[in-house]
Image: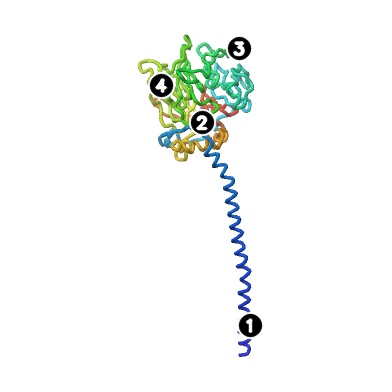
Amino acid sequence: MMNDAAGLRFRRQHRPQVITDELPEHRHKGTGTYSGKVFQVTLLSLGGFLLLPLLVIILILESPISPEVLSLKEPPVMTGCWEPNLKLREAQRLFEDQIVGPESIANIGDVFFTGTADGKIVKLIGRRIHAVTRLGKPPCGSREDESSCGRPLGIRIGPNGTLFVADAYLGLYEVNPTTGESTRLVAGGQLIAGRKLSFINDLAVTQDGKKLYFTDSSSRWQRRDYMQLIMEATADGRVLELDMDSREVTVVMENLRFPNGIQLLPDEESVLVAETTMARIRRVHVAGLNKGGMDTFIDNLPGFPDNIRPSSSGGYWVAMAAVRPNPGFSMLDFLSQRPWIKKLIFKLFSQDVLMKFVPRYSLVAELHDGGVCTRSFHDPNGLVAAYVSEVHEYDGSLYIGSFRSPYVAKLDLRDV
């Protein structure tokens, strides 16, 4: 009994101690809660302090673009002819790091001609590069200098062996490929039918050399602002005709959304025009009974078309530097229905930054009459051939131009 009582007394003596031991823990928790609240308030205050100027900027700054809601069809499922593959990765790079932005390519025999981002027209002979001429004036290389330096885009060979060149800023030129002597046929920046030639892009010349058709992608935006043009989806692009005898320029078709590449059909009564923003190719009638009319050659492409050039099988090669993946997510299709997001994006980011968010995917396709796709070559992520702009076929190979890559890509059709 004594031992039990002592044990009982012992246990009772420890009960207060247990309670006493818990008290510091409660005090610690109370202190931690108070510190946490102070931290939260400080963090929220700091976040508000940093976000407030950003919100003010968003509200005050005016967006450089005024986009409207644009309705694009659901992208086609990439099956059949459009089935993704890696065939374009079989291409080899030519003149790597020796030229930048060889947008368009033409050839006289084994001698190739192209225009580059530094305003030059060059000829490629074997492994060597020779300057033919420069249409603008240095300095070159920066966004600010581009309008005076010039930016040669579309290039063609005329019936007399001269080069016809479309410079985005300076105009249309005829160039002697041997001497480099150039003649300006149409001045860039001039008013035609009340609207400025702000973004001359591509051209096509008839077999007799008497007519020259060209695209002016926008009267509002210049080439250096092409992302603004795409995002705003401005319907101010035109197809124009130059009469080589009278030197008169007339408007053939207007209100197009980023008319880009242009290609005469064999009968020379109509031209194919890539309407890039709308992911389609239009047929514009430039002569004959349907002159002044327009219909659709192919609608709802899986990518955004650039230049169009003939294929040896009687079809047309089309280059696309960005696709509308299905299955998958197309950023440009998503934004087309949300102009307020477009405005916000251009308040916060530059064109160069935005280009980094556009997924690279190079797609080259051969189309035939009726807009039927017969074959396509892909390079997902543009690992070998990036930012493709044109496909020029010669002697069993495709020579692939680019609006910003530092090389020409060559794909031997026997390898694919």
Looking at the rendered structure, the kind of residue marked 4 is Val
Q: Residue 66 carries which label?
A: none
The answer to whether residue 44 is above or below residue 416 is below
* Numbered disc 2: secondary structure: helix
**Within 10 Å of the Cα at label 1, are there few (<14), some (14-19), or many (20+) other Cα atoms?**
few
Depth-wise, is mark 2 or mark 4 nearer the camera?
A: 2
Residue bearing mark 3: 179
Marks 2/3: CA–CA distance: 38 Å
Residue bearing mark 1: 10
Residue at 47% x, 9% y: name it.
Answer: 246
Depth-wise, is mark 1 or mark 3 nearer the camera?
A: 1
Depth-wise, is mark 1 or mark 4 nearer the camera?
A: 1
Looking at the rendered structure, the kind of residue marked 3 is Thr
Percent across and percent down for residue 226 are 52, 29
**Picture quarter containing residue 235?**
top left
Residue at 52% x, 21% y: name it.
Answer: 154
Marks 2/4: CA–CA distance: 25 Å
Foreground of the two, 152 or 51? 51
Looking at the rendered structure, the kind of residue marked 1 is Phe
Mark 1 vs 4, N-terminal side: 1
Percent across and percent down for residue 323 are 48, 34
Mark 4 vs 3, N-terminal side: 3
Residue bearing mark 2: 228
Q: Residue 284 carries which label?
A: 4
> Looking at the figure, which quarter contains the N terminus?
bottom right
Q: Can residue 403 be seen in this view?
A: yes
Foreground of the two, 115 or 123? 115
Marks 1/2: CA–CA distance: 85 Å
Percent across and percent down for residue 351 are 55, 33
Marks 1/3: CA–CA distance: 114 Å
**Within 10 Å of the Cα at label 3, are there few (<14), some (14-19), or many (20+) other Cα atoms?**
few
**Within 10 Å of the Cα at label 4, are there few (<14), some (14-19), or many (20+) other Cα atoms?**
many
